[in-house]
C-alpha cells in the first residue's frame, strides 16, 4: 500500500508517486490539506496584528518551466513553477503555518496539454498534479479548464491529493461536473473553505467567469440567473457564519469584473484575481476590498500579506500589503519538482523544425503583420479547397479572433518549430467557410466592435475585410438563453466603416469568409456567424454527423510554413 517516509531530502511516497518537499508537507499539515480544516499552530505576535501571507499566481496556461531568457544574474528560466514552489518553502520556514499558495485559474492549456498520445485527460491530470507537488493549497477554475469539455476537468480533479479547487458559482449538481463522487467525502471540488493561517481564520471562495459559456466547451454545466454577485453574497454569508475573520475571493473574472464585484458585494476583504492577465504592481482598493492580480505564466508571484484588524474581523489596511515578485533566478528552485516536470515533458509532442521565418513574428499585437498573414493563410487554404464557391459566393477574406492567439512575444527570424505554432495556436480549431449576407457580415463585424474586444473577447483579426469602430456609440444587443445569444435585439452603431476588398459591403450580396469552427459554433458570442451557411472544407454541412475532416488551423499553418509562402509580403 502506498505511504510516505522521511528521507534526507524530504518526504517521499513509498510507492510510485510524486515527491512533496518537506515544507510542502508541513504546509499540508498546517494549512487545511484537501479542504479539511487543520490545527493552526502559529502563535499570534503580541506586538502586532495576526498575519497570513497569500502567495498568488494566475493564468499559468501550463507554462511550468518557463522560457530561457536573460535574467538579472545571467541566463536562466523565467516563470518556473519550481521557483514558486521553492519560494513558498522559504516563506514557510520564516512563517510556519502562516503561508498559503493560491492560483487564479487557467491552468489546463498550453504546451503541457500536447501529449504525443493525444490523451488530453491524462495531460490535465498530470498538470494539476504538478500544482499538488508544488505545494499549492487552493485555486479556482478558469475558462481554459473547459477547452476539452467538463469530463476532462472531472477526470483531472480525481488526480488531486492536497490541492483543492473552489468554485462557488457553478450549478453543477446532476451535470457532468457534479462534485459528488464515491470515495470523495468532501466532493471533487468545493464552493468555499475556512482555512487557519497565521492565527487568522481565512475564508476562501472561488468564482468562474460566466463568459465560459461562449468561449469554451462547458457542456451541460450551468450558471444561475445572477452568475457572479448572488453566489458571492451566499459565499460571504456562509464563510462568516463558519467563523471566517477575513474573506478572500479567488476569481477568474478579469480586473474590471473584480471591481464591479467589490462595489456590489460587501464583506469581501480581498480579491485574488485572474483571467485578464493583468500585472498589478499596486493593489486597487475599492470599497475596502483589496483587488490584486499577478500577470500570467509565472512571470510574477504575488505576495498579499494580510493583517487582521484589531477587532478580530476584516483587515488592518495600514498593516496589509501587496507586491509582485519577479520569478527569476534570484529565487531558489525546487530541483525535485524540476525533475518531475522534465519527466512529464518526455510524454509531450517532440519539437521539430518545420520551416524558416523570413522576418520576426511579433505576437505582442495579434492584429499586426503575423495575424494578418494567419488570416490570409486561412482564406487561401479555404479558397483552394472550395473552388465551387467561385461562381456563387467566393471566399473574400479570412476572419480570426484575437483570443485564439495565445503567445505574446516576438519570435526572431530563423527556424520555425512545431512548438512555436502550438504556443501561438494551442486550440484544436478547424478551418471552415461561412457564407453570409451583406447584412450578416456587417452584424459580424459590428460584434467585433463590442466592449472588451481588444482583450479576451470578441476582437477580430482580418484579411480582405476592413472595419472601423467608434466604441462611444451604442453596442449590439442580444436576447440570451442560458447566457448564450440567440437573437439580435438591436443592431449596434459602433461599426462606422466596413468594406470588402476596399469596396463597401453590399447588403444584397452574399460573401464567404474563412474562419474557425469555434466561431462558426457561435464562440465569443458570434451569433451572426453561427446563423450563416456553414461548410466544412470537405464540402459537408458544418455541425452534422459525421464530423467534418477540415484541416486543423495549426496543420494548415504548418503546411504554409513548410511550403515557404506564409511569410510572403502582405
Image (cartoon, rainbow, N blue to C red):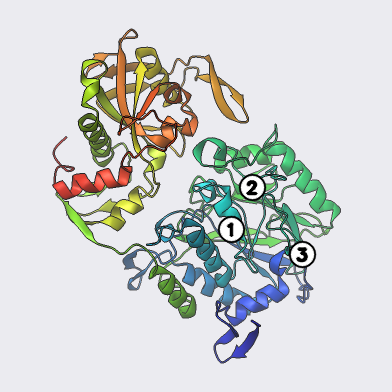
Q: Residue furthest top?
A: 508
Identify whether 295 is placed above or below 303.
above
Please identify the quarter of the rendering in which residue 461 is found.
Answer: top left
Q: Nearer the viewer, residue 92 or 412?
A: 412
Instruction: Tell me residue 323's x, y (percent).
Output: 55, 59
Q: Nearer the viewer, mark 3 or mark 2?
A: 2
Which of pointers 1 and 2 lies earlier in the amino acid sequence?
1
Which of pointers 3 and 2 lies earlier in the amino acid sequence?
2
Q: CA distance from mark 1 to mark 2?
A: 10 Å
Identify whether 410 is placed above or below 460.
below
- In the picture of the structure, the residue carrying the numbered disc 1 is 155
Q: Quadrant of the N terminus?
A: bottom right
Graded by Cα atoms within 10 Å as few (under 14), some (14 to 19) or many (20 or more), the crowding at tag 2 reads some
Given contact means CB atoms under 8 Å apart, are the residues at marks 3 and 1 in contact?
no
Q: Is residue 270 left or right of residue 518?
A: right
Q: Nearer the viewer, mark 3 or mark 1?
A: 1
Graded by Cα atoms within 10 Å as few (under 14), some (14 to 19) or many (20 or more), the crowding at tag 1 reads some
Identify whether 400 is placed above or below 288.
above
Point out which mark residue 531 bears: none
Q: CA distance from mark 3 to mark 2?
A: 36 Å
Instruction: Tell me residue 204's x, y (percent).
Output: 71, 55
The residue at the point 81 percent across, 60 percent down is 310
Which of pointers 3 and 1 lies earlier in the amino acid sequence?
1
Given contact means CB atoms under 8 Å apart, are the residues at marks 1 and 2 in contact?
no
Q: Residue furthest front?
A: 546
- In the picture of the structure, the residue carrying the numbered disc 2 is 176
Instruction: Tell me residue 4's x, y (percent).
Output: 64, 84
Please identify the quarter of the rendering in which residue 560 is found.
Answer: top left
- In the picture of the structure, the residue carrying the numbered disc 3 is 200
Amino acid at each position: 500500500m502506498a505511504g510516505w517516509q522521511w528521507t534526507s531530502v524530504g518526504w517521499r511516497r513509498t510507492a510510485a508517486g510524486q515527491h512533496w518537499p518537506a515544507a510542502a508537507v508541513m504546509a499540508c499539515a498546517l494549512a487545511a490539506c484537501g479542504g479539511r480544516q487543520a490545527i493552526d499552530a502559529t502563535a499570534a505576535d503580541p506586538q502586532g496584528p495576526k498575519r497570513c501571507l497569500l502567495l498568488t499566481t494566475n493564468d499559468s496556461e501550463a507554462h511550468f518551466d518557463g522560457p530561457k531568457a536573460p535574467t538579472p544574474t545571467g541566463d536562466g528560466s523565467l516563470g518556473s513553477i519550481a521557483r514558486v514552489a521553492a519560494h513558498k518553502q522559504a516563506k514557510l520556514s520564516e512563517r510556519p503555518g502562516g503561508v498559503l499558495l493560491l492560483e487564479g485559474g487557467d491552468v489546463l492549456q498550453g504546451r503541457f496539454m500536447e501529449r504525443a498520445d493525444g490523451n488530453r485527460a491524462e495531460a490535465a491530470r498530470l498538470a494539476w498534479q504538478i500544482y499538488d507537488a508544488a505545494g499549492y493549497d487552493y485555486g479556482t477554475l478558469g475558462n481554459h479548464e473547459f477547452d476539452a469539455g467538463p469530463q476532462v476537468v472531472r477526470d483531472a480533479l480525481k488526480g488531486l491529493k492536497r490541492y483543492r479547487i473552489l468554485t462557488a458559482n457553478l450549478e453543477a449538481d446532476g451535470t457532468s461536473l457534479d462534485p459528488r463522487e464515491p470515495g470523495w467525502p468532501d466532493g471533487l471540488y468545493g464552493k468555499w473553505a475556512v482555512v487557519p493561517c497565521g492565527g487568522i481564520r481565512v475564508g476562501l471562495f472561488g468564482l468562474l467567469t460566466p463568459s465560459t459559456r461562449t468561449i469554451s466547451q462547458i457542456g451541460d454545466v450551468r450558471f444561475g440567473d445572477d452568475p457572479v454577485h448572488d453566489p458571492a453574497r451566499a459565499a460571504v454569508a456562509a464563510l462568516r457564519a463558519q467563523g471566517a475573520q477575513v474573506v478572500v475571493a479567488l476569481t477568474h473574472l478579469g480586473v474590471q469584473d473584480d471591481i464591479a464585484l467589490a462595489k456590489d458585494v460587501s464583506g469581501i476583504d480581498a480579491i485574488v484575481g485572474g483571467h485578464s492577465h493583468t500585472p498589478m504592481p499596486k493593489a486597487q482598493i475599492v470599497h475596502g476590498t483589496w483587488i490584486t492580480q499577478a500577470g500570467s505564466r509565472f512571470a510574477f508571484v504575488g505576495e498579499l500579506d494580510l493583517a487582521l484588524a484589531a477587532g478580530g474581523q476584516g483587515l488592518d489596511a495600514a498593516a496589509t500589503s501587496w507586491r509582485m515578485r519577479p520569478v527569476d533566478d534570484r529565487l531558489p528552485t525546487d530541483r525535485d519538482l524540476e525533475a518531475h516536470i522534465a519527466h512529464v515533458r518526455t510524454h509531450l509532442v517532440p519539437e521539430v523544425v518545420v520551416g524558416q521565418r523570413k522576418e520576426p513574428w511579433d505576437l505582442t499585437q495579434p492584429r499586426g503583420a503575423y495575424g494578418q498573414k494567419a488570416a490570409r493563410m486561412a482564406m487561401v487554404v479555404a479558397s483552394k479547397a472550395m473552388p465551387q464557391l467561385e461562381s456563387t459566393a467566393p471566399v473574400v477574406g479570412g476572419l480570426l479572433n484575437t483570443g485564439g492567439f495565445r503567445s505574446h512575444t516576438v519570435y526572431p527570424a530563423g527556424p520555425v518549430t512545431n512548438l512555436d505554432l502550438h504556443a501561438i495556436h494551442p486550440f484544436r480549431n478547424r478551418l471552415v467557410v461561412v457564407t453570409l449576407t451583406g447584412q450578416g457580415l456587417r452584424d459580424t463585424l459590428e460584434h467585433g466592435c463590442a466592449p472588451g474586444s481588444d482583450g479576451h473577447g470578441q476582437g477580430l483579426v482580418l484579411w480582405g475585410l476592413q472595419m472601423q469602430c467608434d466604441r462611444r456609440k451604442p453596442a449590439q444587443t442580444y436576447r440570451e438563453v442560458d447566457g448564450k445569444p440567440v437573437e439580435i435585439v438591436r443592431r449596434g452603431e459602433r461599426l462606422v466603416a466596413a468594406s470588402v476588398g476596399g469596396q463597401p459591403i453590399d447588403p444584397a450580396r452574399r460573401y464567404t469568409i474563412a474562419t474557425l469552427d469555434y466561431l462558426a459554433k457561435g464562440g465569443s458570442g458570434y451569433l451572426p456567424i453561427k446563423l450563416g451557411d456553414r461548410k466544412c472544407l470537405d464540402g459537408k454541412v458544418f455541425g452534422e454527423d459525421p464530423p467534418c475532416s477540415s484541416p486543423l488551423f495549426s496543420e494548415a499553418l504548418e503546411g504554409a510554413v513548410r511550403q515557404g509562402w506564409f511569410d510572403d509580403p502582405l
